[in-house]
Every structure is written in structure tokens, then in C-alpha cells.
């Protein structure tokens, strides 16, 4: 069975000159025996009291059996089920934060996050604020943020990402991941597909705007993406090998960001579009959709936009039919071939669509509540949300007006 060697990637040294952050995650297990390993980990740490945080679904899927397994340790436990009876979904907002904070006893020594992205964001935030470590037990391979330090939280109707802490260890039980809902697996794969455009944007931003770049972190993310693409069919079939590769890839992508301390490798224009849509949903109080569902659709849109509109514009720039005076014009001239090559190497938009479809993911933005107008507005404005140089931000700043 082929797999990614996470330990080897973690131990690699880099001399690129950018600041790098040490990996504080002590253990990462993605196996059929992961829950047992989690119990052993807690035993060696000799904790006296822990708090489990889950929602009603993830408690049934993994919380109950985990609680059963830790009984042998004679460790005190308490459980917090996030969300109230009449809630239709669990959101990482002030209501959930207060619920968890008031449920965690002062003498708890470690908080266990059992769930997908949202539960992790809530626990990451609360554990950090309470000065306690947290342990990650993902229940679906749905997002690359399990190991991240950033906790996106909605406060007073606005989403803000707080820098908090990474888990001290991750134990992902394969039996549970393989049984995850189809749309969560499609979402995780979609978050990985987003790297096809985020890596292109990162290379471009480095060449044109001198954005910081690390070859090792680039390779980590590229390797994670490649493995997912190669094992697409096994992931779609939910084979053990496929699901393991998907989870390892998501974790590796998260570790790459953790190492770099910034989101460049994993988040480009496709993520900016997704954030833009999410903010619109929050403003209109619409039911949220999974992060990876949005990223699947935005990656299809962005890759098509890059391979048609932007490629044509770059060729026109090369011929001299479009011009502007800016230092970027000089850098563009020097790096013309490299930049066109970045676009040529991206998988075709149609291939990306086929993979999303093959996994049972949603391809129609309208079905998720993303209107034509919202898409158009995001293509023109989403780059303003982040101080990042991407093909899209470059196009909007220098070319769009000339084309109008
Ligand atoms: Zn993402
Ligand atoms: Zn480096």
C-alpha cells in the first residue's frame, strides 16, 4: 500500500532564508488502530482529567467508543456536545465558544476535539484561551485545517481568523474516515484540488511581487496534491489506501502552512473567492456550505479563468498590445516564459470538473446558493480581501480596465 511519509517531510531541513516554525505536534497517526493509539498517548501523558468536545453526530460516530476506550485509564472525563436541540447546524461562533468554555472544568488537563473542521476550530480557540492543550480526532477527511493554528470564528456576524494553537497530536481512525459522508470526502478532495491554483498563484506572486517563497513548503504541498490526483479512483471508491492518502495529504498540506507560518501554499484566488461567498452568506444569514464544497467550485472557475482569459491577456502583454507602466511590467517581461509555463502545467479545468463529479461533489454553484452575480462580483473584488499577489489580483489591477 502506497503512502506519504509524514515524519520524513517533518524532519526535512530548509535553508531558504524565510522564517520557519518548529513542529510542535508530537504524534500523527492515520491508521485503523488510531483510537487505541490515542488512549496509549493519554496514558503516557498521565493526565488525570480530560474533556471531550463533539457534536451529536460525531459523538455517535467516534465519541462514544473513544469514551469507552479511555475508561480503562481511570481518568476523569466530561463531555460537551456542542449545539442545542433546535440548532440545525453547529457554527464556530460566540454562542458555541461560550457553550464549550462553560462546559470545560478548570481542572481539565486536555481537551479532545472529536469532529470535522468546525469542532476543531471551536476547540482550537477555547483550549488556547483556557491555556490547555488539545488533541485532534478527525471524523472526516474534509479539510486541510486540522493541524493549523488559525481558528476562523464568526463574531458579531463577521468572520475573523484568530491565531491560536495546533493540536499536540492527531489520531485519525481510518474505519471512521472511510464511513464519512460522501460530500465530506468530496469536500476534502476539493480542498486539495484548490492547490492546483494556489500553488500557481504562489509561484506567480513570488516572481511578480517578490512574495516570500520556500521550495520545501512548495514541495510538501505539491507532493500532497500529486498523491491525491494519482489515487483519485481509490479515493472515489473509498478504498482504505485512497482514504488514507487523502487524509495524509490534507495533514501534509496543513503542516506545510504550519511550517511556513502563512497560508500561501494552500490558499490562492480560489480560497479568496470561497471567503467572499462565505461572507455574503453570513451577511444574508444563509445556511453555510462546507469549505471544500465552495473550494471545489471556485477551483473549477479559477482554473478556467486562468487558462482562458488570463493566458490570452499574458500573450497580448507579450506581443505588446497591452501595456502599463509599473515595476511588475519589467518582472513580467523577464519571467514571461516561466509564467506561461506555470499556467500550462496546471491541470485543465475540465479534468478538475470531472474529478469533482466523479466524487459526487457539487458542480453547480446555484445549487449551493451561489448566484451568477455573486460569482461575477467575487471575480472582480475577492482579491481585495487579502493582501496577496495572485494571477487574479494582477489581472484586476492592471488588465481588466484596459479590456473594458
Ligand atoms: Zn482550504
Ligand atoms: Zn524554506
Image (cartoon, rainbow, N blue to C red):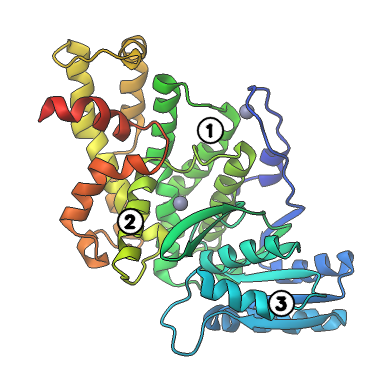
The mark that comes first in sequence, 3 or 1, is 3
Q: Is label 3 in a helix, a strand or a loop?
A: loop
Residue nearest the observer in this picture, 75 or 82: 82
* Label 2 to label 1: alpha-carbon separation: 24 Å
Cβ of disc 3 within 8 Å of ligand 1? no
Q: What residue sits right under mark 2 in the picture?
A: 356
At a point 60% along the width and 36% down the height, the residue shown is: 260
Q: Tell me if 196 is positioned left or right of 324 in this view.
A: right
Residue 182 x/y as whole percent: 41, 69
From the image, tell me which residue sits under label 3. 104
Q: Which residue is mark 1?
A: 218
Could you say whether the residue bearing mark 2 is in a helix, strand or loop?
helix
**72 w.r.t. 253: above or below:** below
Mark positioned earlier in the residue sequence (3 or 2): 3
Tell which of 29 and 274 is nearer to you.
Answer: 274
Residue appearing at x 51%, y 68% in the figure: 92
Residue 382 location, quadrant: top left
Amino acid at each position: 500500500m502506497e503512502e506519504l511519509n509524514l515524519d520524513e517531510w517533518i524532519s526535512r531541513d530548509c535553508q531558504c532564508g524565510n522564517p520557519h516554525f518548529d513542529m510542535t505536534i508530537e504524534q500523527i497517526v492515520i491508521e485503523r488502530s488510531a483510537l487505541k493509539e490515542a488512549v496509549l498517548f493519554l496514558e503516557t501523558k498521565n493526565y488525570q482529567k480530560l474533556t471531550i468536545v463533539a457534536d451529536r453526530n460525531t459523538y455517535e460516530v467516534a465519541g462514544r467508543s473513544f469514551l469507552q476506550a479511555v475508561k480503562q485509564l481511570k481518568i476523569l472525563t466530561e463531555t460537551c456536545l456542542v449545539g442545542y436541540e433546535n440548532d440545525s447546524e453547529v457554527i464556530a461562533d460566540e454562542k458555541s465558544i461560550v457553550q464549550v468554555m462553560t462546559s470545560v472544568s478548570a481542572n481539565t488537563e486536555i481537551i479532545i476535539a472529536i469532529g470535522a473542521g468546525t469542532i476543531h476550530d471551536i476547540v482550537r480557540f477555547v483550549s488556547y484561551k483556557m491555556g490547555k492543550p488539545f488533541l485532534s480526532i478527525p471524523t472526516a477527511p474534509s479539510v486541510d485545517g486540522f493541524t493549523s493554528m488559525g481558528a476562523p470564528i464568526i463574531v458579531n456576524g463577521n468572520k475573523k481568523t484568530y491565531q491560536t494553537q495546533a493540536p499536540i497530536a492527531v489520531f485519525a481512525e481510518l474505519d471512521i474516515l472511510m464511513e464519512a459522508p460522501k460530500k465530506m470526502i468530496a469536500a476534502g478532495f476539493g480542498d486539495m484540488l484548490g492547490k492546483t491554483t494556489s500553488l500557481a498563484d504562489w509561484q506567480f506572486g513570488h516572481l511578480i511581487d517578490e512574495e516570500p517563497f520556500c521550495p520545501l513548503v512548495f514541495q510538501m504541498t505539491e507532493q500532497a496534491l500529486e498523491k491525491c490526483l494519482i489515487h483519485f479512483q481509490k479515493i472515489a471508491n473509498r478504498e482504505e489506501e485512497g482514504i488514507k492518502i487523502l487524509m495524509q495529504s490534507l495533514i501534509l498540506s496543513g503542516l506545510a502552512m504550519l511550517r511556513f507560518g502563512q497560508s500561501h501554499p494552500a490558499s490562492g484566488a480560489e480560497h479568496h473567492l470561497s471567503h467572499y461567498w462565505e461572507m455574503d452568506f453570513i451577511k444574508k444569514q444563509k445556511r453555510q456550505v462546507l469549505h471544500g464544497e465552495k473550494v471545489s467550485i471556485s477551483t473549477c472557475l479559477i482554473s478556467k479563468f486562468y487558462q482562458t482569459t488570463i493566458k490570452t491577456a499574458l500573450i497580448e502583454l507579450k506581443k505588446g498590445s497591452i501595456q502599463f507602466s509599473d515595476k511588475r511590467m519589467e518582472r513580467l517581461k523577464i519571467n514571461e516564459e516561466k509564467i506561461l509555463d506555470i499556467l500550462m502545467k496546471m491541470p485543465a479545468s475540465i479534468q478538475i470538473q470531472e474529478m469533482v463529479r466523479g466524487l459526487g461533489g457539487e458542480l453547480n454553484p446555484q445549487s449551493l446558493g451561489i448566484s451568477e452575480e455573486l460569482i461575477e462580483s467575487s471575480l472582480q473584488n475577492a482579491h481585495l480581501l487579502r493582501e496577496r499577489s495572485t494571477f487574479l489580483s494582477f489581472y484586476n489591477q492592471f488588465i481588466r480596465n484596459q479590456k473594458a
